[in-house]
Image (spheres, helix red, strand yellow):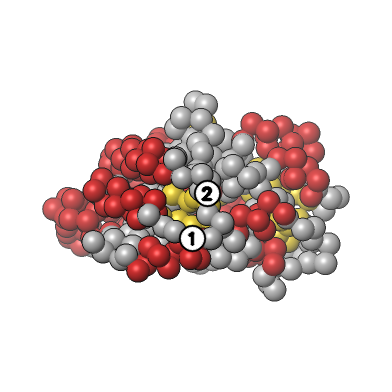
């Protein structure tokens, strides 16, 4: 059986009729940028996340960049430091650079792969302005502890929720725990567009208004130059598609959890593996199912020989990349240990149980 890492055509088959109707309606309306679909999606997305407002932008990278700029905590040329995780998409750190900040990396928790609050505390300097926790692989970061550190040290928290649509910690959704949050709607995400897209979500209505100016040249009337703006708009087609998909998100997340349970139950007996663990029920939406094996590369080859595609998220740690390397950077032993062992298995809502069991079975038959 050939099992690709992800097959989005299955999702699109489920929604084919609704999606085609939504696109047709946009075409017939003749408004393609910042029309009623974007406005309606922003309202629906803010409602889903449980925050006062959302602003649709061109990507998750821009969402994080603009959230940082709009929050006013980092300024170009001031060498303001922003602490984040070394184990994330490079876009997290690129967004900090784009906003004018200096990314500083703190170590992660070995069980959840999210920022370790005590490591964050140790990385704080007189230049630190903000912390960007990443809800990695769909797992919420330890927001209560990070909030306590941020409050004590006067720092702003901005969530990178690009991988955690619908994850919950306590009563609140990802995106509702910090001053502002950034989402990506890249096609592979738990809520994905059919192209690029992103959103900033926040309870701070003024911040959302600033993002709406920044995404469009810096001024609501398009050609002004009031703020250091850019062109970063979510378009009507993507917003219409996201509105078709949003009502399915909870169901899809539940399906991800039930497939993750199959992996957990079947692979739990293999002692060489470290399986993912949810911080609490609901805190993990399994954007990715990432486990560790000490012979990771050999396991990948074995699975590939059996037609099973796996990936590594991420093969490189950001603090070791030339663009982000700094002499002051400490070693990050937990992340460095995990980097050589992590492997992402196929897991998405339209994967079948049979396929999931086949992947698990082939892992159980691996002889290192
Ligand atoms: C954790 C994280 N942050 C930021 C991004 C950037 O999102 P985008 O690709 O939409 O710019 C991604 C997606 O790749 C991501 O996974």
> Does ligand 1 reach within 8 Å of label 1's beta carbon?
no
Q: Which mark is residue 132?
A: none
Depth check: give the residue in front, 251 or 228: 251
Q: Which mark is residue 368?
A: 1
> 10 Å neighbourhood of mark 1: few (<14), some, or many (≥20)?
few
* Residue ID for mark 2: 272
Separation of residues labelled 2 and 1 (CA atoms): 10 Å
Quadrant of the snapshot with the N terminus: bottom left
Q: Position of residue 337 (x, y in %)?
A: 65, 56
Observer able to see residue 326: yes
- Judge left or right: residue 312 versus residue 125: left
- Judge left or right: residue 146 versus residue 249: right
Q: Residue at x 86, y 50 (%)?
A: 126
Residue 236 falls in which quadrant of the image?
bottom left
Mark toward the start of the polypeptide (2 vs 1):
2
Depth check: give the residue in front, 168 or 246: 168
Depth check: give the residue in front, 331 or 296: 296
How many labels, in total?
Answer: 2
Q: Residue at x 61, y 55 (%)?
A: 338
């Amino acid at each position: 059986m050939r099992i690709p890492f992800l097959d989005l055509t299955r999702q699109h088959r489920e929604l084919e009729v609704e999606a085609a109707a939504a696109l047709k309606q946009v075409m017939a309306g003749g408004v393609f940028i910042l029309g009623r679909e974007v406005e309606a999606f922003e309202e629906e997305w803010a409602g889903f996340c449980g925050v006062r407002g959302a602003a649709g932008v061109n990507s998750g990278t821009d969402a994080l960049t603009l959230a940082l700029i709009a929050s006013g905590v980092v300024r170009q040329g001031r060498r303001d430091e922003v602490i984040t995780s070394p184990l994330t998409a490079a876009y997290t750190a690129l967004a900090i650079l784009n906003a004018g900040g200096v990314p500083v990396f703190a170590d992660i928790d070995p069980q959840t792969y999210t920022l370790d609050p005590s490591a964050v505390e140790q990385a704080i300097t007189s230049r630190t302005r903000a912390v960007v926790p990443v809800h990695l692989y769909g797992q919420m970061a330890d927001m209560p502890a990070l909030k306590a550190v941020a409050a004590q040290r006067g720092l702003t928290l901005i969530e990178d929720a690009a991988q955690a649509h619908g994850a919950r910690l306590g009563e609140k959704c990802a995106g509702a725990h910090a001053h502002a949050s950034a989402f990506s709607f890249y096609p592979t995400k738990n809520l994905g567009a059919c192209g690029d897209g992103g959103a900033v979500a926040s309870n701070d209505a003024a911040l959302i208004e600033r993002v709406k100016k920044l995404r469009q040249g810096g001024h609501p009337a398009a050609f002004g130059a009031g703020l250091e703006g850019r062109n970063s708009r979510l378009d009507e087609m993507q917003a219409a598609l996201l509105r078709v998909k949003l009502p399915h998100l909870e169901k899809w997340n539940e399906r991800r959890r039930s497939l993750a349970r199959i992996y957990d139950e079947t692979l739990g007996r293999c002692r060489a593996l470290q399986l993912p663990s949810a911080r609490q029920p609901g805190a993990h939406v399994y954007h990715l199912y990432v486990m560790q094996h000490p012979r990771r590369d050999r396991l990948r080859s074995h699975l590939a020989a059996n037609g099973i595609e796996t990936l590594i998220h991420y093969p490189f740690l950001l603090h070791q990349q030339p663009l982000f390397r700094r002499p002051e950077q400490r070693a990050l032993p937990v992340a460095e240990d995990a980097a050589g062992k992590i492997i992402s298995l196929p897991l998405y809502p339209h994967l079948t149980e049979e396929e999931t069991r086949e992947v698990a079975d082939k892992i159980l038959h691996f002889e290192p």
